[in-house]
């Protein structure tokens, strides 16, 4: 695998080697319109503009999370927010940069002018047809490895939410799937409860 050396802004995605290895320093020089993510130095092009259903679900989840955390020390963010995860570093440089649909960050020292440096407490990804495999495999592994405490994987077509919670050994443990027949409850924020029937019926 090649390791490109980039020293000036890149204005076209096609100018990048899709099989190359990149760092966050490279990422900061990219000036094209397409949204991309880095996972351990590998380039992933994000899906085209999300569907209306996807955007509605992001809005619903954002509203519920914002209302819950409004007077609490945690902050809610939606994409695009660069989250630099501490996995796959090379010579001290970050090589994993993702843009989750939503995330909750309780440690304000992880926030800087460029986004979040470190693992959020809660990550929420809403699956789309084009990104299911990546969310289910590559991003799952880096979220686990970086120490994300809780991960929600929302599957609109199946009307179900999968919840993964980090155990004391740093391994994601899958909880029972949550359907619209029961409220969605967070494990690390026990008072947080969301009515899925309202969201999936929108």
Image (spheres, helix red, strand yellow):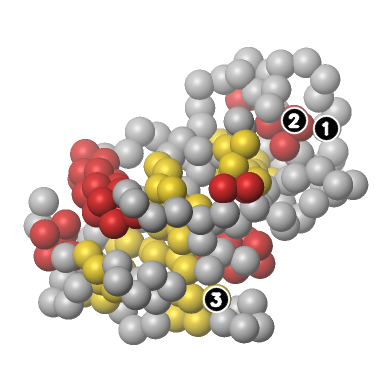
Q: Which residue is mark 3?
A: 166
Q: Is residue 189 above or below residue 55?
A: below
The alpha-carbon separation of the residues under discs 2 and 1 comes to 9 Å
Q: Which residue is mark 2?
A: 26
* Between marks 2 and 1 in the image, the one whose residue lies nearer the viewer: 2
In the foreground, 148 or 30: 148
Residue under the image location 86 percent in, 47 percent down: 92
At label 3, counting other C-alpha atoms closer than 10 Å, the crowd grade (few under 14, some 14-19, many 20 or more) is: some
Q: Earlier in the sequence, mark 3 or mark 2?
A: 2
Residue under the image location 38 percent in, 70 percent down: 189
Q: Earlier in the sequence, mark 1 or mark 3?
A: 1
Residue under the image location 46 percent in, 36 percent down: 80
Residue under the image location 35 percent in, 33 percent down: 49
At label 2, counting other C-alpha atoms closer than 10 Å, the crowd grade (few under 14, some 14-19, many 20 or more) is: some
Q: Position of residue 35 (x, y in %)?
A: 51, 32
Q: Is residue 1 above or below residue 123?
A: above
Residue 24, image quadrant: top right
Decide if residue 26 is on the left or right side of residue 100.
Answer: right
Task: Residue 4: give its label.
Answer: 1
Residue 25, image quadrant: top right
In the foreground, 182 or 200: 182
Q: Is there any visible trace of residue 39 in the rendered image?
A: no
Q: Earlier in the sequence, mark 2 or mark 1?
A: 1
Q: Position of residue 7 (x, y in %)?
A: 82, 20
Q: Position of residue 136 (x, y in %)?
A: 48, 64
Question: Secondary structure under badge 3?
Answer: strand
């Amino acid at each position: 695998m090649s390791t490109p050396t980039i020293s000036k802004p890149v204005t076209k995605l096609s100018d990048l080697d899709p099989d190359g290895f990149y760092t966050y320093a490279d990422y900061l020089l990219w000036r094209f319109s397409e949204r991309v993510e880095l996972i351990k130095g590998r380039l992933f092009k994000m899906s085209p503009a999300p569907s209306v259903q996807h955007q509605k679900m992001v809005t619903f989840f954002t509203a519920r999370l914002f209302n819950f955390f409004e007077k609490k020390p945690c902050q809610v963010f939606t994409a695009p927010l660069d989250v630099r995860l501490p996995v796959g570093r090379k010579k001290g440089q970050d090589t994993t940069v993702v843009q989750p649909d939503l995330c909750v960050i309780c440690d304000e020292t992880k926030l800087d002018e460029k986004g979040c440096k470190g693992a959020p407490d809660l990550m929420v990804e809403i699956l789309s047809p084009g990104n299911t495999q990546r969310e289910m495999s590559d991003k799952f592994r880096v979220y686990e490895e970086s120490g994300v405490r809780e991960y929600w994987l929302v599957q609109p077509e199946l009307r179900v939410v999968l919840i993964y919670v980090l155990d004391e050994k740093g391994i994601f443990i899958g909880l029972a799937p949550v359907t619209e027949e029961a409220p969605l409850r967070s494990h690390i924020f026990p008072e947080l409860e969301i009515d899925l029937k309202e969201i999936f019926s929108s």
